[in-house]
Image (cartoon, helix red, strand yellow):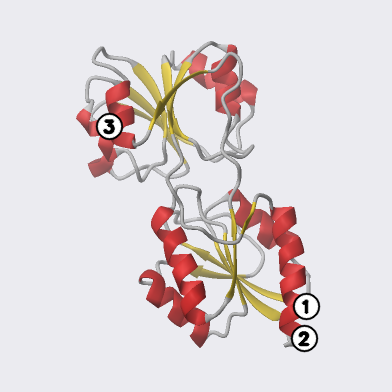
Amino acid sequence: MKPAKLLILGGSGEAADLARALQGDARFDVTLSLAGRTSEPVALPGKLLTGGFGGAEGLAHVLAQEHFHLLVDATHPFAVHMKANAVEAGKIAGTKFLTIRRPPWVQREGDRWIMVESLEAAAVAIGEGPRRVFLTTGRMELAPFRAAPQHLYIVRSVEAPSPQELPPHVELITARGPFNVADERALIETHRIELIVTKNSGGAGAAAKLEAARALSLPVIMVTRPDLPEAPSVATVAEAVVWLERAHGSTSSA
């Protein structure tokens, strides 16, 4: 029996964990798709596709042309356009589809969160007076903070951001996570950070900075989750594996 061809749309820890969970499973022929934003991604099991598809129709064409049986969207929680394209492509190609949507972070006692709905609103919420800001929105989304040039931004990323995106006053830290609470607390104290800006991505991999902020009573500007299209979804990789096993069974029967 031939394995079921699975395309995982990556860009999150869940995508990597799912690829690892299926390593050596002869029931699945796994291909992982990455946007290509990192020049040296972490090596993962399975085949690798990099670059965009050209919208929903382009992705649907790939699904049909390459005879993929299964599609799992494990992109970042804020990858709105990719998620919408995945839902539409699955419908066009008739491919069995699932999305992994990790739960958002929930404010806890001791947190000093300032909730905003966009990066532009986050830049405004920092305030007029100059502050030292730990900016953790991702290296591709720094441009909105050029509108608030009075602040010093500490930016940490796997690769250096494009100079055109950067606010005028920046300290760059090149590092790859995950980071623990002790790491984050040391960074906050060493760089005399007064405030953190982040997106509500959820998950354990990036939560340490929130724990450190809570311990230090540091304010956090939190960008809320965008609205996402309705789709069959699970919250964890383990649930995705169960879904894939069931989908494989029905695919084999068909």
Q: Amino acid at mark 2?
A: Ser
Q: Mark 1 Cα within 10 Å, few/some/many (few <14, many 20+)?
A: few
Total marks drawn? Answer: 3
| Disc nearest the viewer among 3 and 2 | 2
Q: Position of residue 253 (x, y in %)?
A: 77, 86
Q: Mark 3 Cα within 10 Å, few/some/many (few <14, many 20+)?
A: many
* Quadrant of the drawing holding the C terminus: bottom right
* Secondary structure at numbered mark 1: helix
Q: Which residue carries the number 3 mark?
A: 145
Residue found at x 50% / y 81%: 93
Q: Which mark is residue 249?
A: 1
Residue found at x 60% / y 46%: 102
**Is the Cβ of the residue at disc 2 closer than 8 Å to that at disc 1?**
yes
The residue lying toward the viewer, choosing from 178 and 4, is 4
| Location of residue 177 (image quadrant) | top right
Residue found at x 57% / y 33%: 105
Q: Which residue carries the number 2 mark?
A: 253
Disc 1 from disc 3: Cα separation: 49 Å
Disc 2 from disc 1: Cα separation: 6 Å
Q: Is residue 187 above or below residue 236?
A: above
Which numbered disc flags the more N-terminal residue, 3 or 2? 3
Q: Is residue 84 above or below residue 66?
A: above
* Secondary structure at numbered mark 2: helix
* Quadrant of the drawing holding the N terminus: bottom right
Q: Amino acid at mark 1?
A: Gly
Q: Position of residue 202 (x, y in %)?
A: 57, 38
